[in-house]
Amino acid sequence: MWPPRLSPALYDRILDQVWGASVPSITREEPDADSICMAVEEGKAIAVLDSRIAQRHAGSRLIVRGFTGAAPTTTISVAWRKANSEPMVDKFVALTQRDYVAASQAGS
């Protein structure tokens, strides 16, 4: 996996959702997804990855399988520069806020 300092909450959530109480000993950390995939291809690791990243690396030396049942989930956030002057950023933020409100209302 990647170093937990890069995203501690996501790191812990993936460990919990994938392995539950049987979390394996993490013996190797890599700085990014490409390095993780290279370690798997070299036979030095197994990994849990975003499916798009894993599929990009799938080939003769890397086997990719999706989860059966419910896939792991996580909460994400949107960040943008305070001094934004780009109309596209404003549109994107408005879209995410609209979808957040709609999802919140659907869940209540």
Image (cartoon, rainbow, N blue to C red):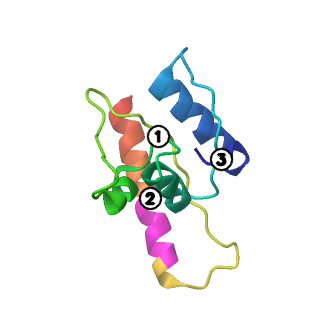
Q: Are the residues tagged 2 and 1 within 8 Å (C-beta)?
A: no
Pinpoint residue 73: horizontal percent, then vertical percent: 43, 37
Depth order, front residue of 51/34 = 34
Q: Give me the C-alpha separation between circle 1 and circle 3.
A: 19 Å
Residue located beneath label 3 in the image? 7
Magenta span includes 54: no
Residue sitting at 40 percent across and 58 percent down?
53
Mark 2, mark 1: which one is toward the viewer? 1
Q: Is residue 26 left or right of residue 93?
A: right
Q: Which residue is drawn at the image coordinates 26% and 29% (left, top)?
A: 68
Dot 1: within a 10 Å radius of its alpha carbon, few (fewer than 14), some, or many (20 or more) residues? some
Q: Quadrant of the C terminus?
A: top left
Disc nearest the viewer among 2 and 3:
3
Q: Quadrant of residue 15?
A: top right
C-alpha gap between disc 2 and disc 1: 34 Å
Instruction: Name the element at disc 2.
Output: helix
* Of callouts 1 and 3, the N-terminal one: 3
User: Is residue 92 a member of the stretch shown in magenta?
Assistant: yes
Contact flag, marks 2 and 3 (Cβ < 8 Å): no
Q: Is residue 14 above or below residue 77?
A: above
Between 102 and 44, the residue placed more toward the observer is 44
Q: Is residue 91 above or below residue 76?
A: below
Q: What amino acid is at disc 2? A: Thr
Find the residue positioned furthest to the top.
Answer: 21
Residue 45, given in percent of the width and then of the height, sits at 51, 42
> Which residue is labeled 2 in the image?
96
Q: Any mark on residue 46, and which? A: 1
Q: Secondary structure at mark 3?
A: loop
